[in-house]
Image (cartoon, grey):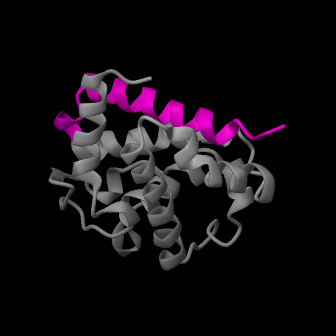
Amino acid sequence: MLSAQERAQVAQVWDLIAGHEAPVGAEVLLRWVGGARGCGARPGSRVGGARREPLTYLPRRLFTVYPSTKTYFPHLAAGADRELLLSHGRRMLAAVGVAVQHLDNLRAALSPLADLHAQALRVDPANFPLLIQCFQVVLASHLQDEFTVEMQAAWDKFLTGVSVVLTEKYR
């Protein structure tokens, strides 16, 4: 699936994210515009070693750009509870971390998560590509110049592989 160079680029970006899973994951899901309701870091702060844009300039993410995705998160949609948002963001990025650690066998590593989303939660599989897009926007906004075109291509390929595995169990 990924070349040795792409694997190295995925690992390099993950090393920058590691330790910041909750705020980065929460930002993928929802971005409030402005002020103190941000997802963990203040304007101009550095997350994963990279400077962030001020919160007021960051676009809204998955729930705002794709409102249909709120269906699965009614408790996070309007006036989202910060702790619930951070908790789900942490779980979401923890799953990405598992995938990064198991690049050789994504199917086995993500099988329980695929079962959960397909059979128990019945998440629309069309939401995974939307989530990938929002995740890449967050990576680009945090990592800026460090997130090269090659890194973006490697992460796109990697996250598409994750999405394929998560949607395989749908029938």
Foreground of the two, 105 or 135: 105
Q: Main secondary structure of the magenta part?
A: helix
In this picture, is 106 found above or below 71?
A: above
Q: Is residue 32 visible?
A: no
Task: Pick the residue in front: 160 or 62.
Answer: 160
Q: How many marks?
A: 0
Query: Is residue 124 positioned above or below 25 on the image?
Result: above
**Percent of width and height locating residue 152:** 33, 29
At a point 40% along the width and 40% down the height, the residue shown is 137
Q: Is residue 63 left or right of residue 19?
A: right
Residue 166 located within the stretch drawn in magenta:
yes
Q: Quadrant of the C terminus?
A: top right
Out of 170 and 112, give the one closest to the viewer.
112
Q: Which residue is at 29% across, 47% downward?
A: 14
Question: Is residue 108 at least partly visible in the picture?
Answer: yes
The part of the image, by quadrant, that contains residue 157 is: top left
As for residue 141 lying within the magenta part, the answer is: no
Q: Position of residue 148 (x, y in %)?
A: 23, 28
* Residue projecting furthest to the right: 171
Which span is picked out in magenta?
144-171
- Residue 20 lies, with reference to residue 36, above or below; the image says above
Residue 123: x, y in percent? 74, 50
Residue 72: x, y in percent? Answer: 72, 59
The residue depicted at 17 percent of the width and 51 percent of the height is 51
Q: Quadrant of residue 33?
A: bottom left
Which residue is found at the position 78% from the left and 59% from the top? 120
Tell me the quarter of the image containing the N terminus.
top left
